[in-house]
Image: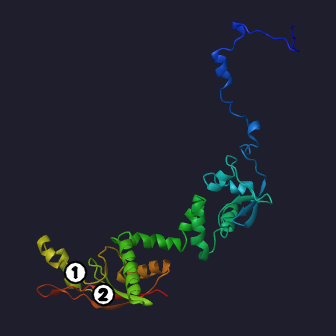
Amino acid sequence: MVVVTGQNQVSATPDDAMSSSDAEDDFQEPATPTATQAGPALPLLPQQFPEVVPLNVGGMFFTTRLSTLRRYEDTMLAAMFSGRHYIPTDAEGRYFIDRDGTYFGDILNFLRSGDLPPRERVRSVYKEAQYYSIGPLLDNLEDIQPLKGEKVRQAFLGLMPYYKDHLERIIEIAKLRAVQRKARFAKLKVCVFKEEMPITPYECPHFNSLRFERSESEAKLFEHHCEVDVSFGPWEAVADVYDLLHCIVTDLAARGISADHQCIGVCDKHLINHYYCKRPIYEFKITWW
């Protein structure tokens, strides 16, 4: 008896057999998915901005014209809103800038009409202008007080060797002594002297004038270190000892450190023959709380 199935049996011939290359093709990795297959795509660039731009700067809201943000092409704001970069928006559709917005209004006022901030905000606005790379605003702010005076002060301090290092040493010594003694304040001795131009009442003109006349070998006889914690000087500038003392106190105050000082005499160390060191010594009192 012959049993016939419902399907015709087809015999495979050598020509119909799958070649090894065909088998390999069946196991190739799938092609890179297209944008449609990969899911939602990122917003296409360039990004389009409205003529009137709503802004959210660190939680503070502003509204300005697009042309205002692009007023100076070399600034960060002009680059951000050029269309070349994607700017995220908040839930209300405002373009978000992750930056403290306290002084952003001053930035906009300059971009709008060239207005400068009042003196008490100049330093803070200057920092924001640096962040946003607004060169014209930086130039204008540097030409008014207090930044103009600060440029002159820094020029003077640039002549002072190791000024920043000595300032840090004052802080470290005062902190160490306050911790060791469990005290609210600490005292240390600081020498501030200006050999080239003896104009303070605590410096001896006769002694200082000798440095221009003695030979190199004789000069070594006068070299010494005053017995103090920190020593500033010498320097060559019109600014005197009291100007440098003001700089020290000002820079300590900028670090949140209260400092008082008073002159307690001179070094008075014997150098050679009848010559003595007449560099002024100041006692600094650093209060920590």
Q: Which residue is mark 1?
A: 208
Label 1 residue SS: helix
Report how far apart the C-alphas of labels 1 and 2 lie in the structure. Answer: 17 Å
> Which color scheme did the rendering employ for the protein?
rainbow
Q: Which image quadrant is residue 145 in?
A: bottom right
Q: Which residue is mark 2?
A: 281
Q: Residue at x 13, y 88 (%)?
A: 274
Crowding around mark 2 (Cα neighbors within 10 Å: few <14, some 14 to 19, many 20+) is many
Work out whether 70 lies above or below 59: above
Disc nearer the start of the sequence (1/2): 1
Q: Which quarter of the rendered picture does the N terminus lie within?
A: top right
Q: Residue at x 73, y 39 (%)?
A: 38
Label 2 residue SS: strand
Tell whether 50 sits left or right of 270.
right
Amino acid type of the residue that numbered disc 1 sits on in the rendered structure: Asn
Q: Position of residue 219 (x, y in %)?
A: 15, 74
Q: Position of residue 250 (x, y in %)?
A: 46, 80
Q: Position of residue 266 (x, y in %)?
A: 26, 89
Crowding around mark 1 (Cα neighbors within 10 Å: few <14, some 14 to 19, many 20+) is some
